[in-house]
Amino acid sequence: MSVPSVDVAKERLKTLLLADRMQCTPETAEKFSADIYHTISKYLEINPKDFNIQITHTDIHIKITGEKH
């Protein structure tokens, strides 16, 4: 049985938080962000330039801007 994408995204977010706490490299953080974008884009029509994710020690902020024309 396959794992739903939402569960995969949750695990990736947990991994990302852990990596941030361990002072991961910018390249690793970028890879995590790309994975999160890819997962969200399966459910929402979004443009990469309108997608922003900020991860701190205590929060994850995902911001999607722009309008669908």
Image: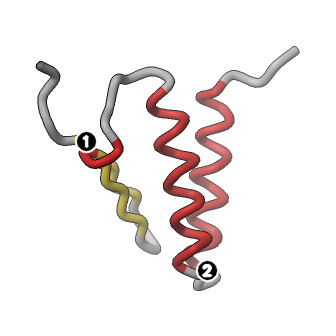
Q: Which residue was labeled with disc 1? A: 64
Q: Residue furthest top?
A: 1
- Above or below, 29 relative to 65: below
The N terminus, quarter of image:
top right
Q: What SS does tag 2 mark?
A: loop
Q: Amino acid at mark 1?
A: Ile
Tell me what residue is drawn at x 14 percent, y 37 percent: 66
Q: What SS does tag 1 mark?
A: strand
Spot occupied by residue 42 in the image (x, y as percentages of width and height): 50, 24
Spot occupied by residue 13 in the image (x, y as percentages of width and height): 57, 52
Q: Which mark is residue 41?
A: none
Q: Is residue 61 left or right of residue 43?
A: left
Q: Is residue 2 left or right of residue 21?
A: right
- Above or below, 31 relative to 19: above
Give the image quarter of residue 53. Answer: bottom left
| 1 and 2 marks in contact (CB < 8 Å) | no
Q: Is residue 33 left or right of residue 48?
A: right
Per the model, the C-alpha gap separating discs 1 and 2 is 24 Å
Residue density around tag 2, few if under 14, some if 14–19, many if 20 or more, within 10 Å: few
Viewer-nearest residue: 6 or 46: 46
Viewer-nearest residue: 66 or 23: 66
Spot occupied by residue 8 in the image (x, y as percentages of width and height): 68, 36
Give the image quarter of residue 44. Answer: top left
Q: Which mark is residue 24?
A: 2
The C terminus, quarter of image:
top left
Say whether disc 1 or disc 2 marks the residue closer to the N-terminus.
Answer: 2
Tell me what residue is drawn at x 61 percent, y 80 percent: 24
Q: Amino acid at mark 2?
A: Cys
Tell me what residue is drawn at x 67 percent, y 46 percent: 11
